[in-house]
């Protein structure tokens, strides 16, 4: 998924070790963010977590290679999706009964 996001041909192995390292770093970011809510690493992560990992890994890859002022879409999207996942999965709102009811 990372190569696809970055526009790297699947048969191009030139960046494989770098991409693997970025995936490991992305997974560490995810685990660090989730560890206060659940046991990590997740034993059977949902697809959204795999997608978040791919976005974060792609963003970390671009961060090392892009001009300093480039808008890092993948990193921003991965961070937002991770926060949204945490909010919807672990921080469900608690509704209080109003005084009029």
Image: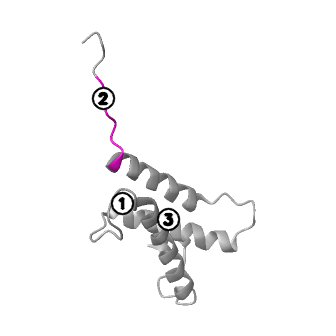
- CB under 8 Å between discs 2 and 1: no
Residue 28, compared with residue 89, is above or below; it is: below
Q: Could you give the CA–CA distance between mark 3 and mark 1, rounded to whole angstroms?
A: 10 Å
Q: Say left or right for 60 vs 40.
A: right
Q: Residue at x 46, y 51 (%)?
A: 83
Q: Which residue is mark 3?
A: 55
Residue 55: percent from the left, percent from the top?
A: 49, 65
Q: SS of the residue at dot 3?
A: helix
Q: Is residue 10 visible in the rendered structure shown here?
A: yes
Q: Say left or right for 75 vs 53.
A: right
- Dominant SS of magenta comes to loop
Q: Residue at x 51, y 56 (%)?
A: 79
Q: Which residues are magenta?
A: 90-96
Can residue 46 be found in the magenta stretch? no
Q: Residue at x 75, y 64 (%)?
A: 68
- Out of 14 and 36, give the one closest to the viewer: 36
Q: Which residue is mark 2?
A: 95
Q: SS of the residue at dot 2?
A: loop
Quadrant including the C terminus? top left
Q: SS of the residue at dot 1?
A: helix
Q: Is residue 3 visible in the rendered structure shown here?
A: no
- Out of 16 and 53, give the one closest to the viewer: 53
Residue 64: percent from the left, percent from the top?
A: 67, 73
Q: Nearer the viewer, mark 2 or mark 1?
A: 2
- Packing grade of label 1 (10 A; few <14, some 14-19, many >=20) is few
Q: Could you give the CA–CA distance between mark 2 and mark 3, rounded to whole angstroms?
A: 33 Å
Q: Which residue is mark 1?
A: 48
Q: Quadrant of residue 91?
A: top left
Q: Could you give the CA–CA distance between mark 2 and mark 1, rounded to whole angstroms?
A: 27 Å
Quadrant including the N terminus? bottom left
- CB under 8 Å between discs 2 and 3: no
């Amino acid at each position: 998924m990372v190569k696809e996001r970055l526009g790297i041909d699947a048969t191009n192995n030139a960046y494989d070790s770098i991409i693997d390292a970025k995936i490991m770093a992305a997974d560490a970011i995810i685990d660090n963010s989730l560890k206060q809510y659940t046991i990590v690493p997740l034993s059977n992560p949902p697809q959204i977590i795999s997608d978040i990992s791919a976005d974060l890994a792609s963003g970390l890859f671009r961060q090392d290679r892009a001009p300093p002022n480039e808008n890092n879409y993948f990193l921003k999207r991965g961070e937002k999706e991770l926060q949204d996942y945490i909010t919807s999965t672990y921080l469900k709102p608690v509704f209080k009964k109003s005084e009029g009811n």
